Every structure is written in C-alpha cells, then in structure tokens.
Image: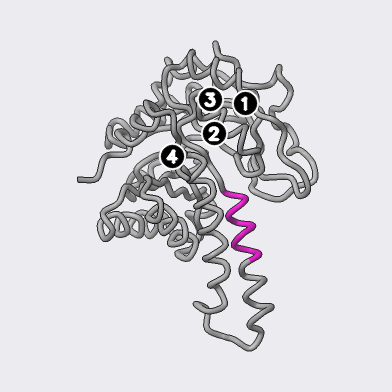
Amino acid sequence: MILTLRQVIAEAKASRVAIGHFNFSDSLGARAILDAARELGVPILLGTSEGERDFFGVREAAAFVKNLREVYQIPIYLNADHTHSLEKVKAAVEAGYDAILFDGGKLPFEENIARTKEVVAYVRSINPEIVVEGELGYIGSSSEVRDALPEGAAINPEDLTKPEDAARFVKETGVDLLAPAVGNIHGMFSNATDPALDIPRVQAVAEAVGIPLVLHGASGNSEADVAAAIAAGVSIVHINTEIRLAWKRGVEEGLKTMSNEVAPYKLLAPAYEGVREVVVKHLKLFSRKK
C-alpha cells in the first residue's frame, strides 16, 4: 500500500532525510524525475508552478501524476508550487493535487498570515489530506542562471526569517510545512556557488515551529550546506533551475549532434538523460544513499 504524502513527510522528518521536489513542464522531464526515483527506491514530489500549470494544464498534470502512481505503485506526489492566489489554489485542489504551496513571501507579514490562513481553511474544508505549505521571507521568484542576487531577496541576516515570526506564522495559519528564508535564493549563479545557508537559523526556526521545513531554491547551493540543512530540520528540498539547465543543454546537444534527425524522441534523449542524472545526484544526497 502506498503511504500518504503526510506519512512520507513524517517519516522523512523522523529519519532526518529529505524528500526531493523537482518541477516539470513536460512529460519528458516528469518521466526523467520518476525514473530517477524508481532507480533509487525513494519517494518523490513533482511540482508545477503557476506558469508550468498553465503550460501543461492543471488537470492534465494531476491526472498524469496520478496515473504514474497507480501504474508503477510508487510514492510519487504532486505539489502546486508557488501559488499566489486563492483562485489558483482552488483550481489545483479541484484538479486533485496532493499539496499546495501558497506563496505569500513577498507580502507584509500580517497580510501573509491572513491570506495563508484563508488558504488553509479552504483546503481543509475540501480535503484535509492535502498538505498545505506557507512561505515566510522573499527569496526571489524566478528559476534562472544569474550573475547577481535577485532584487529584494532576503540575504542579510536581519532580513532572514526570524524564529519568533515563524512560530507565530505557523500557529495562526495552521500550515503543515514552512518554507523560510535562510540564505537560500531562487535560481543559481552562472560561475559560483550560491551564498552559504544560515544553518543555525534553520535549526532555530525548526525548533520554534515544530513542523517540517522546506528548502526552496537549493539549485546552486553546496552539497555540504544542503546536507547540514536537512540535519537541522529541512524535510523537503526544491530543485528546479538545475534540471531546467540540464534539459536545455540536452536539447542543444541533441540538435547539434543529430542535425539531420527529425524524430523528437531521438533529439530529446540527451535532455531526458541530463535531467535524470541531476535528479539521481540530488536524491542520493537527500536520502543518504550511496
């Protein structure tokens, strides 16, 4: 019997390992992520942002992942990543998503609490099994390879998520998961490792809230930092930019090395393999597999 997402997250938290969360916008990327998880025998979270849902289709994405779970009988779940409105939350819930991230990280603190609380109440009224995540602190909003920090991202110590604010946020909203700003940023640098994570901050926030933490924007962070964050209380780690970059490079390789080919499944094979390799690498780190 396949465990529920709540059970999988609870097991990860208790074991001090993390579930890998990887976004997709096409079936090739999703299959590469799925095959990596099957290879290692670990649970997986697939995610679609609002833009990815618009491209793939919100109902189509939910049906696609549900079918994969039933066909392969593996713990694979779907998250509505970075959702910014109740309307979009409702669409994902009605489609059958397993988890919802309401992203109010850029909102003023009080407004973030009020709107996240509204989302939690709605989701609970429809399906209490759906996991709801809140975000506290702004870490940028786009997955891209960059040369500078995203404007407005919380990097300075005084701008990072404070344990006391996190405790109040979780208590008043009732979220199941919290994504704090702990030095992480969306996207990754082109020629350097991302700024170091504030691991003592991760631990302090985890102790203050008592629920699993989610690390967003982990593409570009050092393996040592990510491992330390998991040990300090992170139970889900998001990777997106790295797999998008692997997909792009794979497409470029296919077009370059098979310039006379027109069969999509042949041209896209390097993209599939690139994404799968990136996911395997991260899942081994998150789950402590060799």
Image location (x, y in percent) of residue 191: 78, 48
Pair 1/3: label in front: 1
Disc 1 and disc 4: Cα gap in Å?
A: 18 Å
What is the crowding at mark 3: few (fewer than 14 residues within 10 Å), some, or many (at least 20)?
A: many
Image location (x, y in percent) of residue 146: 75, 47
Marking on residue 19: 4
- 280 or 206, nearer to the observer: 280
Q: Which residue is mark 2?
A: 215
Q: Which residue is mark 1?
A: 182
What is the crowding at mark 4: few (fewer than 14 residues within 10 Å), some, or many (at least 20)?
A: many
Q: Is residue 218 left or right of residue 98?
A: right
Q: Secondary structure at mark 3?
A: helix
Q: Secondary structure at mark 1?
A: loop
Q: Which residue is mark 3?
A: 112
Q: Which residue lies most toward the top here?
A: 164
Residue 167 seen in render: yes
What is the crowding at mark 2: few (fewer than 14 residues within 10 Å), some, or many (at least 20)?
A: many
